[in-house]
Image (cartoon, helix red, strand yellow):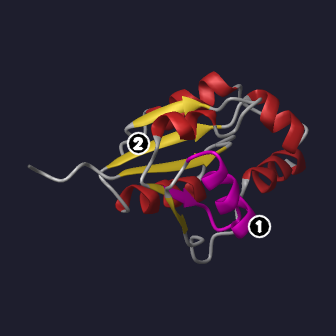
Amino acid sequence: MPPSPITVLATGTFDLLHRGHLHYLQQARALGDRLCVIVASNETLLHKKGYFVLPVDERAELVRNLKMVDEALVGDPSDHFKIVKKLQPDIIALGYDQVQDLPAFETALRQNGIQAKVVRLEKLEGYDTNTTTIINRIHSL
């Protein structure tokens, strides 16, 4: 019997998709056989950043159509673990700047019945662009 495919989960806002996002998702995909991505809801972005540029349906469609992504889902703003519990991924891939308190995050996962291995991925060397810098560049034009 062949081994079960390894499911990797990545999460993010993906507002104004850029090279840093692609690097993150390529690294995540390399960790397993199947990459599922949770795209943060509009409500989550408003709470975290105070804004979003593209609505969640557009952001999810863009991510869903990337060749390394097998499935893209919209996050639940009231329960960030809801989809993770349903998917039960083998690996959760974190970007270099996601989740500052890793031990607390891993404890929360276990408390929610999620046994996934957590892997922190590397920043794209020499690349300092993010959504905020893109927005600032546009404002300066």
Tell me what residue is drawn at x 60 percent, y 51 percent: 18
Q: Is residue 80 visible?
A: yes
* Residue identifier under label 2: 69
Q: Residue 78 in the image: x percent, y percent? A: 77, 29
Q: Residues within 10 Å of mark 2 (few under 14, many from 20)?
A: some
Q: Residue 11 in the image: x percent, y percent? A: 60, 47
Considering every residue shown, the one lying at the far bottom of the view is 125
The quadrant holding residue 107 is bottom right
Looking at the picture, which amino acid does disc 1 mark? Asp
The number of numbered discs placed on residues in the rendered structure image is 2
Q: Is residue 51 visible?
A: no
Rounded to the nearest whole Å, what is the CA distance between mark 2 and mark 1? 27 Å
Disc marking residue 71? none
Q: Nearer the viewer, residue 53 or 2?
A: 2
Magenta stretch encompasses residue 123: no
Of tags 2 and 1, the one toward the viewer is 1
Q: Nearer the viewer, residue 43 or 133?
A: 43
Tell me what residue is drawn at x 61 percent, y 54 percent: 110
Please state the extent of the stretch shown in magenta in the rendering. Answer: 92-113
Disc marking residue 101? 1
Tell me what residue is drawn at x 88 percent, y 37 percent: 47
Say what secondary structure mark 2 lies in: loop
Q: Nearer the viewer, residue 122 or 6?
A: 6
The quadrant holding residue 27 is bottom left
Q: Residue 49 in the image: x percent, y percent? A: 87, 44
Looking at the picture, which amino acid does disc 2 mark? Val
Say what secondary structure mark 1 lies in: loop
